[in-house]
Amino acid sequence: MTLTRRSAETEMGLAYDMVKRYPALHVALEVGSLDLPKIRTIIRGVGHVDTVVANKAIEILLPDAPQLTTGQIAARLRKLVIEADPDEAKKAYDQGTAEAKVWSCLEPDGTGTMISTGMEARDLSAANRNINHLARQRKNGGDTRAIDKIRSEVFRDLLTGEIVPEARRAQVTITGDLATLEQLNERPGHLEGFGPVHADILRQIVDEQQDATWVYEITDTERGEVYVGTTSRRPTTSQKRRLFARYRTCIHPTCRMPATQCDVDHTEDWIDGGLTTLCNLAPLCRFHHRLKHLSGWTYRKLANGAIEWVSRFGLRYVTHPP
């Protein structure tokens, strides 16, 4: 077969893994439901955990695997491995960070490659965001080259000390559920741009971001609705767009000021614990905003979507948004 010794070892290792360690993959290859690239992707994705855990994840993945790309398989497998045995996944993660290293080599064309392995997931995400941020600054400053070329030079300049970036903490976007944060389960979180991370990493990142602004989502599975809010007093751009689409003008009965020129008011005041959610926000022009806070007028949202105002004298007015 004219194979080198290393190539022969690789082929024998693949065969051994399929037949002895992950027999379900051998069957899938034999009947033709999976091809070799997918088989290799799966074995690479479970090779760092116990065989029992690996086979649990493979069993769950196999029904969908024929319809997935290798990239989709790899991403889904990372989450399944964590869910199958969170403790084993954490152990493998810790071992990987303990064995972190940086290595470099020359390529056949004379250029060089540098690789860092075993980085903490959150550090990897933060580093990537910083490189992207600096590269975009150069691009916006008139650099017409491909963004990947600019990113490569930013990476080089940071390591060689040619540039010292401004003091800024890179934003890290991570998603997880409340039960995991409360240590009621060990479901993995999701690090934007990289994929699943185990629950312990999720909680660590959250603990480090006590003063950050968080966006939260409440899912109503019965209605198929998702309600989005933020821990910030100021609503997000997306919330404003939806708010102005629903209320075209100031919600006071007599006012026609366009909503886009109004203040965004918390129906239940922020200082009293009111949340920054769509159901607690409404547009008020500056005059009627002051009227609410200084002159004894109040309003509430009714179940049918109407707005009920009560004047300082107890008179009631109901308006219906378009």
Image: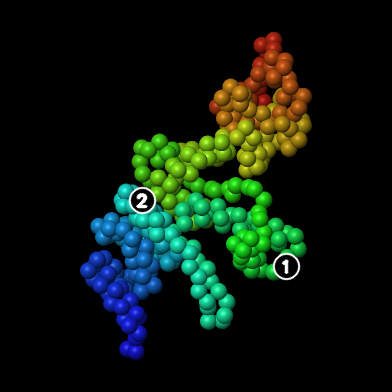
Of the residues shown, which amino acid type is indicated by label 1? Answer: Thr
Judged from this view, the residue extending furthest toward the bottom is 2
Q: Are marks 1 and 2 in contact (CB under 8 Å)?
A: no
Q: Is residue 278 visible?
A: no
Identify the mark nearer the N-term, 1 or 2.
2
Say which of 63 and 193 sits in front: 193
Q: Residue at x 35, y 80 (%)?
A: 7
> Given the current orientation, which residue lies at the most extreme left position?
20
What's the coloring here? Answer: rainbow
Q: Nearer the viewer, residue 148 or 96?
A: 96
Q: CA distance from mark 1 to mark 2?
A: 43 Å
Quadrant, the C terminus:
top right
Q: Is residue 6 left or right of residue 281?
A: left
Instruction: Pick the quarter of the image with the N terminus.
Output: bottom left
Q: Residue at x 53, y 40 (%)?
A: 209
Q: Which mark is residue 144?
A: 1
Residue that label 2 marks: 90
Query: Helix, strand or loop at disc 2?
Result: helix
Q: Picture coordinates of residue 184 (x, y %)?
A: 36, 37
